[in-house]
């Protein structure tokens, strides 16, 4: 083996060692956290999307659900709506007021969120479940891990 071949062999050996070390240092892929939250413009209504968490009381941990909050004692309720990949999933009302409990809502019962799904969420103040929505905020995101 001549000097040129030895240098090439050494270079390839060092390169392989560096690449192997880099791959081992990265380790296994970790699940991404898709949870997010929005509020109405003045902050009185809130909508959380929980990627994974405690879910509804007594129901155990759950994957992919919403929590609707009423943060103000302003005599308005809060309503939320959701979409998955452009398909309307429905709406849910929280009329519990500031002192009441948040409403846990899982519109993904039959088909949990998958990676790359587009999730749309909207939260508004309303006067009653069928009242006209006002002071709204909308947000759409792409799920990373489903």
Image: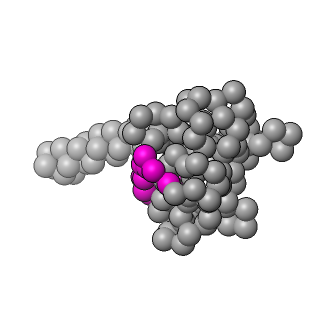
Q: How many marks?
A: 0
Query: In the visual, does 104 lie left or right of 48?
Result: right
Query: In the visual, does 5 lie left or right of 23?
Result: left
What residue is at 54 percent from the left and 72 percent from the top?
87
Residue 16: x and y in percent read: 34, 46
Of 5 and 76, nearer the camera is 76
As drawn, the residue found furthest toward the right would be 58
As drawn, the residue found furthest toward the left would be 4
* Picture quadrant of residue 81: bottom right
* Picture quadrant of residue 52: top right
Query: In the visual, does 28 lie left or right of 56?
Result: left
What residue is at 45 percent from the left and 50 percent from the top?
134
Residue 30 appears in the picture as rendered: no
What residue is at 67 percent from the left and 60 percent from the top?
107
In the rendered image, residue 126 lying in the magenta stretch gets the answer no
Give the magenta part as a residue range.
133-145
Quadrant for the C terminus in the image: bottom right
Magenta stretch, main secondary structure, is strand
Of 30 and 3, nearer the camera is 30
Residue 88: x and y in percent read: 56, 69
As drawn, the residue found furthest toward the bottom would be 87
Residue 13: x and y in percent read: 31, 44
Residue 67 appears in the picture as rendered: yes
Query: In the visual, does 18 lie left or right of 130?
Result: left
What residue is at 50 percent from the left and 69 percent from the top?
85
């Amino acid at each position: 083996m001549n000097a040129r071949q030895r240098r090439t062999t050494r270079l390839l050996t060092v390169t392989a060692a560096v690449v192997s070390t880099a791959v081992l240092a990265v380790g296994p892929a970790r699940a991404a956290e898709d949870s997010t939250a929005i509020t109405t413009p003045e902050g009185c209504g809130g909508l959380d999307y929980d990627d994974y968490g405690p879910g509804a009381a007594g129901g155990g941990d759950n994957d992919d659900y919403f929590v609707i909050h009423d943060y103000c004692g302003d005599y308005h309720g809060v309503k939320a709506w959701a979409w998955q990949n452009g398909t309307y999933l429905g709406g849910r009302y929280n009329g519990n007021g500031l002192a009441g409990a948040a409403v846990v809502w899982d519109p993904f019962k039959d088909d949990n969120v998958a990676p790359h799904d587009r999730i749309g969420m909207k939260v508004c103040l309303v006067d009653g479940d069928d009242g006209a929505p006002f002071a709204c905020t909308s947000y759409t995101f792409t799920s990373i891990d489903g």
